Image (cartoon, rainbow, N blue to C red):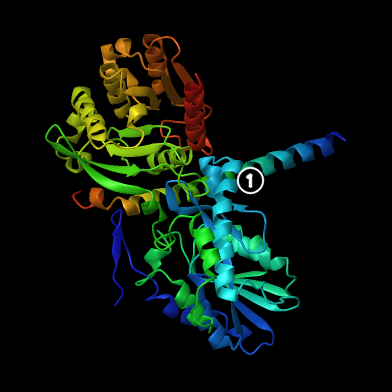
Amino acid sequence: MQLFASLLALAGVTRSHASETDDSAKAAAAHSMLVAASDARDFEKRTPC
Amino acid sequence: MLNATSVGGVVLRPHFRDRTDAGDALALSLNTFAGERGVVVLGLARGGVPVARQVAAALGASLGTLVSRKIGVPGIEDVALGAIAEGSRRAVHDAVAWYIGVPADVVDQLAVRERVEIERRVQLYRGGEPLPDLRGRTVILVDDGLATGASLRAAARSVRGKRPKRLIAAVPIATPSGAKEVRPDVDELVSIVTTEEFETVAASYGDYSPVTDDEVLALLGRPARRAPSSMVNDISSRIAPASSSALDPSSEVERTVEISASGSVLMADLGGPRHVDGDETDGVRGLVILANGGESSRNSYRSRYIAGRLRAGGYATLRVDLLTQDEQCGDRGGADVRRDVEQIAARLSSVCDWAVDEAVHGVDNTILIGASTGAAAVFVTAARRPQQILAVVSRGGRADLAGEALSRVETPSLLIVGAADVDTLRRNNDVLRQLPNGAQLVRIPRAGNTFAEPGALGAVAEHTLKWLDRLERK
């Protein structure tokens, strides 16, 4: 029973870690998209620089 | 020869001449379906239809269209926070909505506007007829590119409801993250290019001219015609002009202005309030001037989103860079000016004068929001103009640099700080003690200095709007 509980706990940790990694990747992709859209608009700022 | 563009120093070369070229290339990747009976190619209107036509012609399949609309981020409409397709009641929420922290009810209200446009297009392209019977058939959904995947996911869910035998999504170019989002909703995803080096779908094409309704009708082999005039009138009164929306819908509500301030020329974007469903508001609740002190320009997505969200809440907005273009580059005294609170406050004062002189809507109720050293400038300005400035908000800024001016501020004040931004939090707590009673400090859990954590930026916008609501009711 204890082994089963430990396995469940381990699976939970793994799932939680996978979910955090997934969220980080999602956040990074969304962030890049927003930055790219803003940079693309910033013509006048990029030109003199 | 395809012209290259440079974004952030990275040279990007378009992958396709135009949508026809992309369609020809995509057809090669789909040639296993050539000659198969009952295949239907549905191009997502409008941009996907020219691509789909080439695919359908090469495969000998029938061609149709499905109307799916992305729901743009307020203030950054060229990025989708979700999408909705014909035949589907629910909007697909995208990772961008989650990342920013756009409330679900706001996404739903934004979807209302797109549903109206979907109705118009279905009426125009198919005379209001539903999609053809797709049961037991192989359906290939085609778009001209896949960024977040929201439009394709919404379209795929709509088609799934029609019980096709097999559902394929096919695009010339895709982001890996967008492809990952779409795969669970289709049996197969075909993409010629899947790349991280993806700025926008438009950058992947040499010619990405908007596709018009008449072009869609011609590609579908239907005569150019218009929806019944009564319907056009009905819809045009409810939605903003759609002609430019394929490229830059935000231009519908904002225009760039140059403001002379103490011998310098400052760049700003002025926008009128607009309900989230696209209707212009009857009245203006106030003018919000978003003052950027240099660390973050007015065109940062943070400034653009907060302005877009405030416009949806009934405010006119003016996003202004308090540093000139040269100073922002950092090599012409930019750092010196950035730290010169007196100078940037004088500039902000000139911006306030300009708004009065131009009789900008809402100027009688002016609210200042400052980021980075712009926060110091808004407090100095509020101390000097108590009659004009209704309220002041610091967005993770260096309000402490306003110095002794803080003790003279009589204006209601809100300090918003990321809870993980320990230095700014400590400084803003000191500021709070110097401001008059009633000033508030809101900590955004887990957020850092730039509110780049999931949900943080949305929380800043919603806290600001709720605080302004309460202020207005007093």
Say which residue appears at 54% left-offset and 87% top-offset.
Answer: B57
According to the picture, the residue beneath numbered tag 1 turns out to be A18
Say which residue appears at 28% left-offset and 55% top-offset.
Answer: B9
Say which residue appears at 28% left-offset and 71% top-offset.
Answer: B3
Q: Is residue B432 above or below residue B327?
A: above
Judged from the image, the secondary structure of the residue bearing numbered disc 1 is: helix
Chain letter for the residue marked with disc 1 in the picture: A
Question: Which corner quadrant of the image does residue B245 belong to?
Answer: bottom left
Q: Residue B183: x and y, percent?
A: 63, 63
Most distant residue in the right direction: A1
Question: How many dots with numbers?
Answer: 1
Most distant residue in the left direction: B263
Q: Is residue B25 above or below residue B176?
A: below
Q: Can the viewer see residue B47?
A: yes
Crowding around mark 1 (Cα neighbors within 10 Å: few <14, some 14 to 19, many 20+) is few
Q: Nearer the viewer, residue B235 or B310?
A: B235
Q: Residue B383: x and y, percent?
A: 29, 16
Question: Quarter holding the N terminus of chain B?
Answer: bottom left
Q: Is residue B324 left or right of residue B153?
A: left
Say which residue appears at 60% left-offset and 74% top-offset.
Answer: B127
Q: Residue A38: x and y, percent?
A: 37, 49
Q: Is residue B23 above or below residue B462?
A: below
Question: Which corner quadrant of the image does residue B292 belong to?
Answer: top left
Amino acid type for the residue under numbered disc 1: Ala
Q: Is residue B335 left or right of residue B20?
A: left
Q: Is residue B226 above or below residue B57?
A: above
Q: Can the viewer see residue A26?
A: no
Q: Residue B440: x and y, percent?
A: 46, 17
Most distant residue in the front direction: B230
